[in-house]
Every structure is written in structure tokens, then in C-alpha cells.
């Protein structure tokens, strides 16, 4: 009888070059159409670009700091109370923080046109490392929305 494997009981293996599970997760989000080899190549090329742009810091450290900088602390969620919908600010769980950071960085990199994906990803990671760029703007907008709707925090569930 075949075992039924799910994502929860399979271990994520660290990548080959940096030996980091964070890189493996990021590459899985970067991947399209199941082409993991292409995704790894794009990521490693981006890390080479990051190494050229930021001389004094190792590329993996730039990547990890960029992810940490983009992670949101608060977000707004819709809550219906008596026929009205309120945008209620709530804390973000660590797992969701990471997935949102990945999503925003990749969306910002994919939004830039005219250059190879590795170059776009590298520039977005360097921007996020320096606390600027499109992904940081998205994070700031989410925090601004949460701050603006602080009056509805008592509706949090």
C-alpha cells in the first residue's frame, strides 16, 4: 500500500550552494511551471549580481536582511460588524510575514520590465536591504493602513 505524502510530513531540504532552507523556500516561490532548476539558476545569478553591488556584505546576508526588512508587523483584515465592514489592524504571524515578504519582493521584481529576471531580482533585493524599493513601499502602505484604522482595533478577534 502506498503512503499518502502531504506537504506537512515532507522535509524541505536546504539548497546546495548556501545550505539555507530560507533560500529553498524562496526558490520554491520563485519557480514557475515546476522548473526548479531554472529558478535556482535565476536566484544564484541574482546573488552574483548582489555580490557585485554590495561589496562588503556576503550575498546571503543581504538576502536574509532584505527579507527581514520587508516582513510586515501589522496588516488589516476585514471584519463584518452589524452590516458594516471594518478594516481591523492585526498582528501578522511569523509564517505569514515570511510569505508576504517573498510575495512582495517577487511581485516587485516581476513588475520591472526590460531586464533579465536575475538582474531585476538582484536590484529589488539590494533595494530591500537598503530599506527602499517597491517591496518596502508595499510594506509601508500596509503599515500605514493599519495605523489609520487603529480605532477599529477593539474589533479584533
Image (cartoon, rainbow, N blue to C red):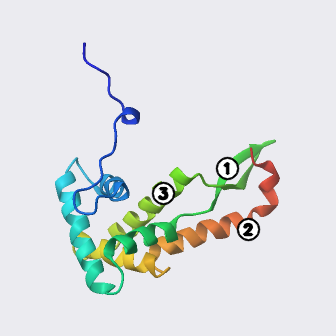
Q: Which residue is mark 1?
A: 78
Outermost residue toward the top in this view = 1
Residue 148: which disc?
2
Residue sitting at 51 percent across and 71 percent down?
A: 69
Q: Is 49 left, or right, of 128 in this rendering?
A: left
Residue 88 visible in image: yes
- Which of 85/34 is in front? 34
Of helix, strand and loop, which one carries label 2? helix
- Which of 82/32 is in front? 32
The residues tagged by marks 2 and 1 sit, at their Cα atoms, a distance apart of: 14 Å
Quadrant (top left, top right, bottom left, bottom right) of the N terminus: top left
Residue sitting at 22 percent across and 57 percent down?
A: 16
**Which one is in front in this view, the residue at disc 3 or the one at disc 1?**
3
Residue 98: which disc?
3
Residue 67: which disc?
none
- Picture layout, residue 34 above or below residue 137: above
Of helix, strand and loop, which one carries label 1? strand
- Picture layout, residue 44 above or below residue 27: below
Q: Is 90 left, or right, of 43 in this rendering?
A: right
Which is more N-terminal, label 1 or label 2?
Answer: 1
Quadrant (top left, top right, bottom left, bottom right) of the C terminus: top right
Q: Residue 7: x, y in percent?
A: 37, 36
Asked if marks 3 and 1 touch (Cβ < 8 Å), the reply is no
**Which one is in front in this view, the residue at disc 2 or the one at disc 3?**
3
Amino acid at each position: 500500500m502506498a503512503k499518502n505524502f502531504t506537504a506537512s510530513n515532507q522535509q524541505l531540504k536546504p539548497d546546495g550552494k548556501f545550505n539555507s532552507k530560507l533560500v529553498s523556500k524562496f526558490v520554491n516561490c520563485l519557480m514557475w511551471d515546476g522548473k526548479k532548476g531554472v529558478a535556482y539558476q535565476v536566484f544564484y545569478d541574482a546573488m552574483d549580481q548582489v555580490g557585485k553591488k554590495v561589496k562588503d556584505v556576503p550575498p546571503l546576508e543581504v538576502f536574509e536582511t532584505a527579507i527581514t526588512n520587508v516582513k510586515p508587523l501589522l496588516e488589516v483584515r476585514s471584519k463584518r460588524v452589524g452590516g458594516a465592514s471594518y478594516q481591523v489592524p492585526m498582528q501578522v504571524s511569523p509564517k505569514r510575514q515570511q510569505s508576504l515578504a517573498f510575495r512582495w519582493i517577487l511581485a516587485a521584481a516581476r513588475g520591472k520590465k526590460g531586464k533579465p529576471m536575475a538582474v531585476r531580482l538582484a536590484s529589488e533585493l539590494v533595494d530591500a536591504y537598503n530599506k527602499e524599493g517597491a517591496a518596502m513601499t508595499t510594506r509601508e502602505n500596509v503599515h500605514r493602513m493599519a495605523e489609520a484604522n487603529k480605532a477599529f482595533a477593539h474589533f479584533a478577534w
